[in-house]
Amino acid sequence: MQQISYLFIESTTFQHDPHGINYYDDYDFFNNTFGTPVLPQVGNDRTKSLLTGTRTTILGTGTMLLSVNYYDADGRIIQTKSENHLNGVNAGTEWWTMTGTLTED
């Protein structure tokens, strides 16, 4: 398994906090409370180079909200789960036809 390292350089002249963090390639990132994919979603072996998660700061609070993207075998997002500012969870699911078009609700 390939390990990816990140270098954080601490500045003594000013304080900065990230407003957003992106995760790619797999679902093994820190504190992924939504967990790993379930069928028909694909696992880590099929998500290389894809955006699997994000953390976004609520400005003025320091709270970071998690969103996770789940993909199908063709690399299309089929589900997104996101924390919201009310301490709840939003989930959206996309359905694709056999011809590769997105279905309408």
Image (cartoon, rainbow, N blue to C red):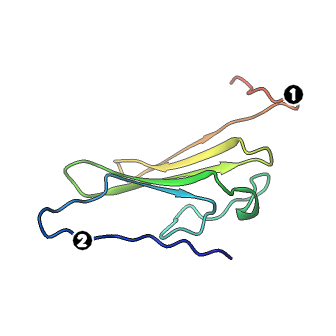
Helix, strand, or loop for circle 2?
loop
Circle 1: is it few (<14), some (14-19), or many (20+) Cα within 10 Å?
few
- 8 sits left or right of 90 in the view: left
**Residue plotted at (63% across, 60% down):** 25
Helix, strand, or loop for circle 1?
loop
- 105 sits left or right of 53 in the view: right
Residue 9 versus residue 40 in the image, above or below: below
The image quarter in which residue 11 lies: bottom left
Q: Say which residue label 2 marks.
A: 10
* Outermost left residue: 13
The image quarter in which residue 77 lies: top right
Q: Say which residue label 1 marks.
A: 99
Amino acid carrying mark 2 in the image: Glu
**Residue plotted at (43% across, 51% down):** 88
**Residue plotted at (69% across, 56% down):** 47
Q: Which mark is residue 81?
A: none
Residue 63 screen position, x and y as percent:
29, 57
